[in-house]
Amino acid sequence: MKSILLFSLLFLTTCATAQPVNTGWFNSIAIKGYDTVAYFTEGKAVKGSSELKYKWNGALWKFSTSKNLELFKGNPEKYAPQYGGYCAYAMADGEKVGIDPKSFDVRNGKLYLNYSTDVQNKWKADVEKFIKIADTKWQK
């Protein structure tokens, strides 16, 4: 019974003090370990390496190359996903929802992640509208 109460307290505390970056339940890894810079440089989702990592904004970011790591260190805001790495489509509804790192959109120099391919298709139906709404909701 004590362990259930402790877990409940931990869960509620974690939810009440949500991190600025979407990470795993039991770790602090951003984008499920995918290289955020690779979305820009390679145009695809690339798994990062445990050897190439950097702590920024309360999360651990992994990279596939040392060049990508250095690019991120030089300007993390440029490469970090919008809305803390939560699903961009869901953020338009004011919701923080997890993502599939392979469902992404780089638009106007910004990275947007989505929950799934199906959700991404909905997102792409009217991206500019969803960005405008999500930007407002994220500020709240």
Image: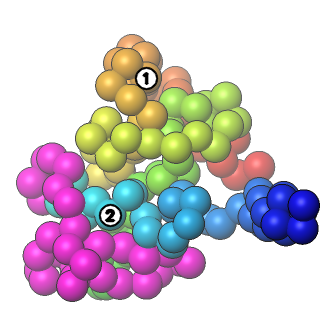
Let me know if residue 47 appears in the view. yes
* Residue at the spot 52% in from the left edge and 24% down from the top edge: 129
* Residue at the spot 22% in from the left edge and 67% down from the top edge: 48
Which residue position holds label 2?
A: 33
Q: Which mark is on residue 119? A: 1
In the image, 128 versus 64, the foreground residue is: 64
Q: Is residue 126 magenta?
A: no
* Amino acid type at mark 1: Val
- Left or right for 71, reference 115: left
Q: Which residues are magenta?
A: 41-70
Q: Residues within 10 Å of mark 2 (few under 14, many from 20)?
A: many
Q: Is residue 56 magenta?
A: yes
Residue 29 appears in which quarter of the rendering?
bottom left
Mark 1 vs 2, N-terminal side: 2
- Left or right for 61, reference 58: left
Residue 121: percent from left, percent from top: 35, 18
* Amino acid type at mark 2: Gly
* Residue at the spot 51% in from the left edge and 30% down from the top edge: 89
Q: Which mark is on residue 10? A: none
